[in-house]
Image (tube, rainbow, N blue to C red):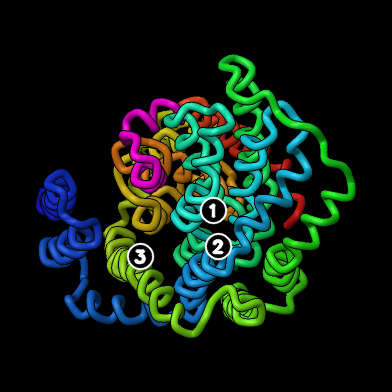
Amino acid sequence: MAALVGTLIPLLIFAGLLVLGVPVFVAMGLGSIAFIQLSNATMQMTLFADTLYSGLSSFALIAVPLFIFTGDAIFEVGVARELLDFVESLVGGLKTGFGSATILGCGLFATISGSNASDAAAIGRITLGRLYDTGYSRNYAAAMVASGASTGVLIPPSISYIIAGIILGVPASTLFLAAFIPGVLILFSMVAVNVVVNRSEGYESGGEFQGAGEILRSGWEAKFGLLIPIIILGGIYSGVFTPTEAAAVAVGVTLLIGLGYSTIALGDFSGMYKRSAILNGIISPNIAVGIVFSQVISVLGLPSEVAGALFGTTQNFYIVTLLMIFFFLIAGAIIEITPNIIILGPLFAPLASEIGMDPVHYTVVLISALGVGFITPPIGLNLYVLSGISGESVLDVARSAVPFMISMLIIVVVLAWFPGLFMWLV
């Protein structure tokens, strides 16, 4: 009975604080303290302070602020627009040319920024006005960019995969290899959705194919933007860089490009530092306190209990994976991705192991399912970013994003049931 009380009361405190709108890292922190004080396990309050420090002292976590800064710098340097022009030269002659180019541009920008928020803000500022002029409705245009930008954490390099790797003990470089095909599959599923919706609504008639000469010209204009992901991913996949070192190289290369072509000046650095510091200041407390919360629930054996409860209900691989995805989708809709990775990752890892999921396979399914939360109310971070840029209401944008949400969910289930599609890379 005492053990039940020691577990139930802290969970109620944690859930109650979330319902009241208390920041997630505060709720996790107070919940962890309640667990430590009320549990019969041999845990001391020193665990809280020690884990807070050790959680943020990881070398791999240095990549997080560096990729955030890279995403902001890329926009300031002007590379994002050049990348989008290059993609449009490839697909602009299709009926859904600029819409497809917008989604593919989100994916290409994702290979640099590692962040969905940076992707959404950068591509949204560049494309929305032209999408309106092309014929797309304001709500749908905003939803399309919000959905495409979710690949910011699904296509490597990804801040979320770095955090998941630290929490679950899987090398980020291995996760980057495994995540590339799933991220691209989700990206192209969104392009397919846009083609279907465009056929139904007649938003865009498309233009004329501008020829190989225009592709070469725009490719040359975007050479530095194309060079950065080649350096990042090529260095990581070849073993030349760790993800952290690759992030540092990306920052250096981006700033040198901007300074060399006078698209940024030294005076712009303070603004970029400030914006990146604010975003990092949102992520870092969640990581630090979340690691404490994760360790506390692990000591109490909650992951094993969850695995035992669900595995006792059914041992069918397909049903269990569907149940896991369902939990991830619900959590992604109400809590931001970083605390979800830290809490749910270790919580369901034993269950994934019981049904034979490789840790890399499990992590890819976890991140991909949580990625749907970027366009799912009430949290839906990308919805808020695009609502702010477009001036449309969050709910209107969310309604238009439903087809993209469905396409993402279908790919997540495919990834869970058919790991051979991408696991061959690792």
N-terminal of the pair, mark 1 or mark 3, is 1
- Which of the 4 quarters of the picture holds residue 24? bottom left
Q: CA distance from mark 1 to mark 3?
A: 15 Å
Identified by mark 1, the residue type is Gly
Residue with the mark numbered 2: 113
The residue sitting at 83% across, 50% down in the picture is 215
**Which callout, 2 or 3, points at the residue further toward the start of the chain?**
2
First to last magenta residue range = 382-401
- At x 45%, y 37%, the residue is 142
Q: Which image quadrant is residue 156 in?
A: bottom right
In the picture, the disc for residue 283 is 3
Q: Measure how far apart labels 2 and 3 are at the Cα level.
A: 15 Å
Tell whether label 3 touches label 1 (CB within 8 Å).
no
Instruction: Judge from the rendering whether residue 119 lies leftward or rightward of residue 230; answer left or right.
Output: left
Of badges 1 and 3, nearer the viewer stands 1
Q: Position of residue 254 (x, y in %)?
A: 61, 75
What percent of the width, then of the height, locates residue 344?
38, 50
Q: Residues within 10 Å of mark 3 (few under 14, many from 20)?
A: some
Q: Position of residue 9 (x, y in %)?
A: 11, 50
| Labels 1 and 2 touching (C-beta < 8 A) | yes
Closer to the observer: label 2 or label 3? Answer: 2
Q: Residues within 10 Å of mark 2 (few under 14, many from 20)?
A: many
| Camera sees residue 245 | no
Image point (49%, 67%), residue name: 72
Marks 1/2: CA distance?
7 Å
Q: Which residue is mark 1?
A: 152
Pick the front one: 279 or 156: 279
